[in-house]
Image (cartoon, rainbow, N blue to C red):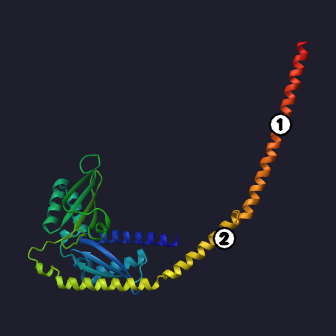
Amino acid sequence: MADEMEFIEQGLQRSQIDEFFADELARAGYGGMELAPTPMGMQIVLKAEKPGMVIGKGGKNIRKITTQLEERFDLEDPQIDVQEVDEPDLNAQIVADRLANALERGWYFRKAGHTTIDRIMEAGALGAEIVLSGKVTGNRGRVEKFNRGYIKHNGEPAEEIVDHGKGVAVMKLGTIGVSVKIIPPEAKLPDDFEIHEDADIEDLVVDEEEAGEELEELLEGEGEDAEAEEATEPDAADEAAVEEIVEEDVEVEEGAAATSPPDTDADVEEELDELAEDVEEFEDVDEDAEETAEELLEEMEDESEEGEE
């Protein structure tokens, strides 16, 4: 369980650090982070809309954040690199925080959702999705979705290509969760393809002479392989000798299991004489049986005549 617990602790620590940056750098337009352990310490890359506010005057704010990371999360020598977000409307985390702030300021959720997703598509995104969940209107919670373009929900593209962002709007009736997904303009999806209308067909046509030469080389290679196989195969004479040996073994086994038939005429005559003697014995037995039967019949007739008298 040591490895599993280590992965769980790393994921929990990453989530806690992300929440810390979201709270501390909300005014600077926090756009996400990346953690990379190095031999020199933990390398942290921060994305922000206003890098100047993250660094602070004379680096005061960045030193404060570094000290808090060492004390709260027990990080050894964290090295923070702040990068500016080129297009804030294509950063899912920044868009989610903006939408949450708009809802807290009193914007109607439909107007805020449509306006936000239109800005995302105008910035050049291939697709976007906004999900609002909670007590949007009234005391009953529900889910509202806003979709534009093309979005991936499953598989590796959903994890590697789609940019995810989450925010929370604290309202009087309760909290509203904000989830934003954006596919950036430069994303290359697995099912993308291009049609070149001005392509030169000659580059794609195969030369018949070159194809014939390649075919001959392939056939020669197959012929060499066949000769090598024939060289390794046993000769016909060897196969015949092996078959004879196998047949002899089979005959010997059959002879051991069953009785051998008579080989000479003398043996045949002896067996015929024995059979004739057996037949004569059976005939004698039949004659004795007939005599006994006749005697029994005579006795029975005599007894019947005496009884009549």
Residue at the image point whose x is 77% and y is 55% from the top = 273
Q: Residue furthest top?
A: 309
- In the picture of the structure, the residue carrying the numbered disc 1 is 289
Q: Is residue 43 above or below residue 113?
A: below
Q: Is residue 87 left or right of residue 298?
A: left
Whether residue 41 is visible, yes or no, is no
The amino acid pointed to by label 1 is Ala
Q: Is residue 76 left or right of residue 193?
A: right
Residue at the image point whose x is 56% and y is 79% from the top = 241
The residue lying toward the viewer, choosing from 208 and 10, is: 208
The residue lying toward the viewer, choosing from 276 and 164, is: 276
User: Residue 1: percent from the left, percent from the top?
Assistant: 52, 69
- In the picture of the structure, the residue carrying the numbered disc 2 is 252
User: Residue 104: percent from the left, percent from the top?
Assistant: 23, 58
Whether residue 297 is visible, yes or no, is yes
| Local SS, label 1 | helix
What quarter of the picture does the C terminus occupy?
A: top right
Q: How far separated are the C-alphas under marks 1 and 2?
A: 49 Å
Residue at the image point whose x is 19% and y is 73% from the top = 186
Residue at the image point whose x is 23% and y is 48% from the top = 137
Between disc 1 and disc 2, whose residue precedes? 2
The residue lying toward the viewer, choosing from 102 and 163, is: 163
Quadrant of the rendered structure where residue 292 is? top right
Q: Pointer 1: residues within 10 angstroms few (<14), some, or many (20+)? A: few
The amino acid pointed to by label 2 is Val
Contact, mark 1 vs mark 2 (Cβ under 8 Å): no
